[in-house]
Image (cartoon, coloured by chain):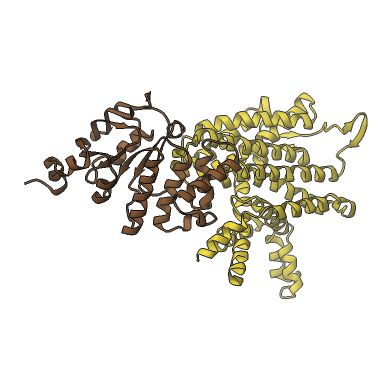
């Protein structure tokens, strides 16, 4: 069953179409890679799905429910959570408090939230950093903190916006393993990523965006052998 | 470096000791009027209480939620005017009038919130100033309702009785001292409760990053308005207290921009977003402002013997230093902000962290 349906979504900024008539479906429990050159409209699509921008045209259907026009907080409450390309730690709060803010989305009890947050910190192997201030973490740990924080909101679906950007190969491998672990828990994921090796490894399906339009869709093997995708990435003569 | 960061997170977490210390201080303050009858000293204590209430109130919105309102005179004035209008025009005792003030502040807060929270950052600050000014001008220009520029003088303050027994007739400063002593810890308690609840987490998340907070399921409109309402109602309480204590309100004394600025300064000097910051801020600012006003500086200079009060220059100092109190006050505030950007409390904390870090 499709957990997320994107139907003819367009987003215009003035005359510029950041997304033009994008449609695809995402099956429950799958990982979808969303790739494309810079400026292809990947983050804009994330913003349209999670309520930061209302789509100019088209529909976003999550669990059979139309999401257009819902505020981001409502989207999160309905079970769809996102991370940010540019990480947004709550700098003056401790790592544990950061994750607790996410957990408090579903509970009023600080104790429950704290237990849940600690669990998520164990998932990303940061339980020993719980008392540190989030603002002092290095980039790799900030990215993992983002993931722990959204996991604490107990989502059915995660949208990860370049969680591997700026990480060294060892850190990237750790994130890849983390994404696969999250898949093991039955959480559907949509992943924006520039690291092709990583995206080929983790994705069940891939959607390629170019200049706001959907260029191709398929499993990783189909995508790497698609001439249009190769042309978009390497340029055409 | 990392131990430093860890320690600073630890220190802000220790609270059991502070509760005990706080209760001890309150108990100590309760018996002060038995030993101190000097009205001027009591007056300064009352001002410190009042300033603490104002600072703690603003802190919930400004310090915890990060919405820097520079229009809190609106709520202060609302509380002050509501209580005075009920007292003078409707003969309602202030301990009932206060509730009218609270209700009025609630309404004003929701109206101001619905206008200003559409804006972020500096635009919010400007809007909060503008809306407070509008309210001041309305108060000034609706004499049929508010007595306009003449203000309202309290003449009919009834004695406070319980079951026919007169508890106090408000002829001394002591009853006001105890009202302040009740209200200031109350606002501290409210702040503590907020910080140790879901609200505190959500407020601070909004302060740190609105978009991130929004994406984590926090409704920005709802929680900003909750912060504003709590803050506005407590500020209105301070306004009511001030009005009854001074016995007179007019637009410049309870609604002007400098009240709003004063409220913000209490927190900035003490330490923004901390429970005891406004207390420290009040302890610094109130005595400082009183000392400057009463020409303490000139008399200190004379005491050093460098300048004689009878000389020409001495006379000049004597005449002008008191008038320059606002200038000197301003300079001192700038110095504190320059050297202690996180306020006096933040500065002390940093010292403590450094010492602990050094031993470890």
Locate residue B294, reporting x and y percent: 74, 58
The answer to whether one can see residue B65 in this image is: no
Locate residue B328, reporting x and y percent: 63, 60
Quadrant of the rendered structure where residue B307 is? bottom right
Q: Residue furthest left?
A: A237
Give the quadrant of the C terminus of chain B: bottom right
Residue at x-position 78% and y-position 43%? B182
The answer to which of A105 and B153 lies nearer the viewer is A105
Q: Is residue B303 left or right of residue B31?
A: left
Colour-to-chain, brown: A
Locate residue A28, reporting x and y percent: 35, 32
The answer to whether one can see residue B139 in this image is: yes
Q: Residue furthest bottom?
A: B306
Q: Is residue B318 left or right of residue B209?
A: right
Q: How many marks?
A: 0
Q: Residue furthest right?
A: B165
The answer to which of B71 and B1 lies nearer the viewer is B1
Residue at x-position 54% and y-position 45%? B204
Q: Is residue B135 above or below residue A234?
A: above
Q: Is residue B42 left or right of residue A6?
A: right
Residue at x-position 76% and y-position 71%? B303
Colour-to-chain, yellow: B
Q: Is residue B96 above or below residue A178?
A: above
The answer to which of B29 and B141 lies nearer the viewer is B29
Locate residue A129, reporting x and y percent: 50, 56
Residue at x-position 27% and y-position 47%? A201
Quadrant of the rendered structure where residue A36 is? top left
């Amino acid at each position: 069953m499709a957990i997320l349906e994107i139907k003819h979504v367009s987003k215009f900024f003035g005359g510029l179409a950041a997304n033009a008539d994008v449609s695809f479906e995402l099956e429950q429990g799958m990982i979808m890679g969303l790739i494309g050159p810079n400026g292809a409209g990947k983050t804009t699509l994330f913003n349209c799905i999670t309520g930061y921008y209302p789509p100019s045209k088209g529909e976003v259907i999550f669990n059979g429910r139309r999401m257009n026009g819902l505020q981001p907080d409502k989207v999160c409450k309905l079970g769809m959570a996102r991370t940010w390309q540019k990480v947004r730690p709550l700098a003056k709060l401790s790592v544990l408090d950061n994750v607790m803010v996410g957990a408090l989305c579903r509970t009023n009890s600080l104790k429950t939230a704290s237990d849940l947050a600690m669990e998520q910190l164990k998932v990303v192997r940061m339980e020993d950093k719980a008392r540190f201030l989030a603002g002092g973490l290095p980039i790799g740990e900030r990215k993992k903190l983002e993931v722990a924080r959204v996991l604490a909101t107990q989502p059915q679906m995660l949208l990860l916006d370049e969680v591997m950007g700026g990480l060294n190969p060892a850190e990237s491998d750790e994130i890849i393993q983390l994404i696969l672990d999250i898949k093991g828990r039955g959480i559907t994921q949509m992943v924006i990523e520039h690291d092709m090796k990583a995206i080929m490894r983790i994705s069940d399906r891939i959607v390629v965006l170019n200049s706001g339009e959907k260029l191709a869709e398929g499993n990783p093997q189909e995508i790497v052998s698609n001439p249009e995708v190769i042309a978009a990435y390497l340029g055409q003569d | 470096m990392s131990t430093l960061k860890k320690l600073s997170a630890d220190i802000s977490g220790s609270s059991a000791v502070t509760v005990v210390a706080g209760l001890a201080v309150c108990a100590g303050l309760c018996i002060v009027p038995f030993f101190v009858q000097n009205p001027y000293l009591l007056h300064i204590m009352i001002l410190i209480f009042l300033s603490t209430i104002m600072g703690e109130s603003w802190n919930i919105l400004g310090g915890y939620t990060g919405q820097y309102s520079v229009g809190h005179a609106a709520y202060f004035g609302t509380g002050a005017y509501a209580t005075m209008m009920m007292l003078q025009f409707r003969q309602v005792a202030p301990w009932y009038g206060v509730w009218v003030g609270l209700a009025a502040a609630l309404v004003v807060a929701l109206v101001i919130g619905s206008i200003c929270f559409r804006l972020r950052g500096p635009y919010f600050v400007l809007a909060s100033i503008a809306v407070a000014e509008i309210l001041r001008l309305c108060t000034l220009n609706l004499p049929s309702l508010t007595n306009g520029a003449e203000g309202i003088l309290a003449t009919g303050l009834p004695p406070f009785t319980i079951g026919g027994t007169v508890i106090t007739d408000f002829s001394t400063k002591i009853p006001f001292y105890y009202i302040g002593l009740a209200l200031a810890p109350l606002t501290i308690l409210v702040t503590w409760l907020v910080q140790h609840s879901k609200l505190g987490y959500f407020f601070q998340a909004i302060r740190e990053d609105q978009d991130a907070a929004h994406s984590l399921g926090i409704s920005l409109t709802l929680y900003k308005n909750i912060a504003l309402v709590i803050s506005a109602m407590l500020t209105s309480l301070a306004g009511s207290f001030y009005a009854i204590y001074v016995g007179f309100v007019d637009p410049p004394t309870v609604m002007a921009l400098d009240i709003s600025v004063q409220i913000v300064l209490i927190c900035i000097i003490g330490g923004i977003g901390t429970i005891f910051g406004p207390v420290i801020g009040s302890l610094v600012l109130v005595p400082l402002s009183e000392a400057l006003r009463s020409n303490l500086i000139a008399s200190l200079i004379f005491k050093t013997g460098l300048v004689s009060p009878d000389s020409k220059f001495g006379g000049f100092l004597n005449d002008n230093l008191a008038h320059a109190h606002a200038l000197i006050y301003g300079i001192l505030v700038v110095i504190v902000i320059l050297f202690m950007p996180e306020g006096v409390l933040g500065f002390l904390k940093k010292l403590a962290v450094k010492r602990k870090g050094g031993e470890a």
